Image: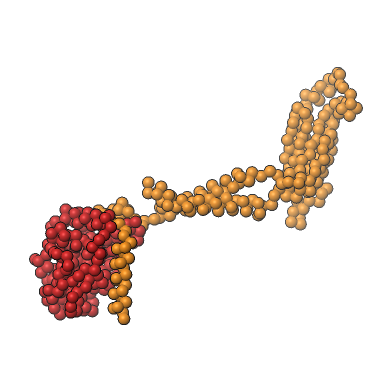
């Protein structure tokens, strides 16, 4: 198993740390039966990947065995925040296209209890890859091994990948940046999510001034 | 409460609009609308006997019945005289004598009537005539001609009354007193009201999700966490992503 290092500052402002603790607590209270959680947002750069990684760290520190699955194959932010010791950074796309096994793509991290699967190197059509039966197979395997799987997805405005991935999740967290989205602009993304029949666990408001 | 917060955020805009409103009011009234001047003259109306005695400098000891009747009619006559001064006929006569024109065409009597005001002191028998105009000399000319014309009309309308022209109107040196502060205040209030109206319209049309309450109201879902903005964290995250993007393209 490859080992990845998370390139995130471990020191956070107190109020940010507290906010993640609240998120973790609420997530544990409200969806103890949900194992696969899609992290979605309407637009790009609303803080989705950062929330996924910070939440993953927080849950792992609380004793959960957590996997971060990077399903943003179009514009992965997570991949920029990890460093792998050696070899190509194979991940989700490589597995979904059948080029490797689950064992090849799972990386342990420098945070005990936290694992991740990077976006990968294969440049197939992400929409088709997620429709693939291997996607269901991947989540099936992961559910047996991990307590919680956090799936970082593409922004809903970019492609429908997030809705396709969300359909395979037990629930979704909607990340929305404070002051960036209008209520009327959120109607379509929410409808897309509803059509995917993925229950919305709750909203995380990010970058609140 | 949200509305008050929105107004609070827009307070600089309200103050700016109030200042612009006050400045606009000043410019409109002082620069675009020319100042007006008020020329003033007056006439004294008295009964014939009073007039003669007054003219002769004698003291009247006894009054005839006819004179007493005229005295009783005096207040009413003063009012009617004031009406005569403001009448269409008087204005037409003044326009004719002074050849008053507006934009090259003869001035309308109604336009001149609007410039004329009278104030009657019934007990003293004095009618003060005021003429307001943008030209100080013209205001004085109109007042003087109007006084002479009206005096003749009043004297010919009833016998037994005497009209004395008391003072000659002079061209006023200063514009009529304007309440500049009031204008500035009104301008400021209109500006502030306009800004408040704009803020209200913006507020009513604003559906940007800023707070957890906005999110819950507009998304119909519970907000389970609010992550405060952390400049260091956001900047570092975005920069790493951009660096990676550059590496990927090169």
The residue lying toward the viewer, choosing from B75 and B166, is B166
**Relative to B55, is B71 on the left or the right?**
left
Quarter of the image where the C terminus of chain A is located = bottom left
Residue B160 seen anywhere in this rendered image of the structure: no
Quarter of the image where the N terminus of chain A is located = bottom left
**Relative to B137, is A21 on the left or the right?**
left
Q: Residue at x 83, y 33 (%)?
A: B163
Pinpoint residue A110: horizontal percent, then vertical percent: 17, 67
Where A163 sits versus A98, above or below? Answer: above
The colour scheme used here is by chain
Pinpoint residue B184: horizontal percent, then vertical percent: 59, 47
Q: Colour of chain A?
A: red
Residue ranking furthest to the left: A144
Q: Residue at x 82, y 29 (%)?
A: B46
Residue B228 seen anywhere in this rendered image of the structure: yes
Q: Colour of chain B?
A: orange
């Amino acid at each position: 198993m490859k080992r990845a290092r998370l390139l995130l500052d471990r020191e956070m402002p107190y109020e940010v740390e507290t906010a993640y603790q609240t998120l973790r607590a609420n997530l544990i209270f409200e969806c103890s039966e949900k194992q696969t959680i899609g992290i979605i947002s309407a637009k790009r750069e609303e803080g989705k990947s950062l929330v996924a990684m910070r939440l993953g760290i927080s849950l792992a520190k609380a004793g959960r065995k957590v996997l971060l699955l990077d399903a943003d194959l179009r514009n992965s932010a997570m991949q920029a925040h990890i460093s792998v010791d050696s070899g190509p950074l194979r991940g989700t796309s490589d597995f979904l296209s059948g080029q490797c096994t689950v064992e090849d793509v799972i990386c342990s991290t420098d945070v005990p209890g936290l694992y991740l699967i990077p976006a990968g190197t294969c440049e197939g059509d992400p929409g088709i890859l997620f429709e693939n039966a291997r996607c269901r197979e991947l989540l099936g395997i992961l559910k047996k091994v991990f307590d919680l799987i956090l799936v970082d997805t593409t922004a809903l405005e970019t492609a429908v990948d997030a809705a396709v991935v969300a359909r395979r999740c037990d629930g979704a967290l909607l990340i929305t940046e404070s002051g960036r989205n209008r209520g009327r602009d959120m109607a379509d993304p929410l409808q897309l999510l509803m059509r995917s029949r993925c229950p919305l666990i709750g909203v995380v408001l990010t970058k609140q001034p | 409460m949200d509305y008050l917060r929105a107004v609070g955020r827009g307070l600089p805009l309200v103050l700016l609009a109030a200042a612009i409103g006050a400045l606009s009011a000043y410019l409109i009234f002082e620069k675009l609308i020319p100042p007006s001047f008020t020329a003033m003259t007056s006439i004294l109306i008295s009964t014939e006997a009073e007039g003669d005695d007054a003219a002769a400098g004698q003291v009247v000891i006894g009054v005839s019945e006819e004179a007493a009747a005229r005295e009783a009619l005096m207040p009413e006559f003063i009012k009617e005289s004031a009406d005569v001064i403001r009448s269409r006929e008087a204005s037409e006569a003044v326009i004719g004598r002074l050849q008053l024109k507006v934009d090259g065409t003869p001035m309308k009597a109604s336009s001149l009537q609007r410039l004329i005001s009278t104030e009657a002191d019934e007990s003293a028998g004095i009618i003060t005539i005021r003429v307001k105009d943008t030209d100080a000399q013209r205001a004085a000319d109109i007042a003087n001609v109007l006084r002479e014309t009206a005096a003749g009309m009043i004297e010919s309308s009833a016998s037994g009354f005497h009209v004395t022209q008391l003072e000659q109107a002079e061209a006023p040196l200063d514009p009529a007193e304007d309440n500049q502060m009031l204008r500035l205040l009104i301008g400021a209030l209109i500006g502030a009201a306009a800004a408040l109206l704009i803020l209200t319209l913006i507020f009513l049309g604003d559906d940007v999700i800023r707070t957890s309450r906005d999110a819950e109201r507009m998304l119909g879902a519970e907000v389970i966490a609010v992550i405060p903005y952390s400049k260091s964290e956001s900047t570092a995250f975005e920069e790493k992503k951009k660096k990676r993007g550059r590496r990927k393209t090169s």
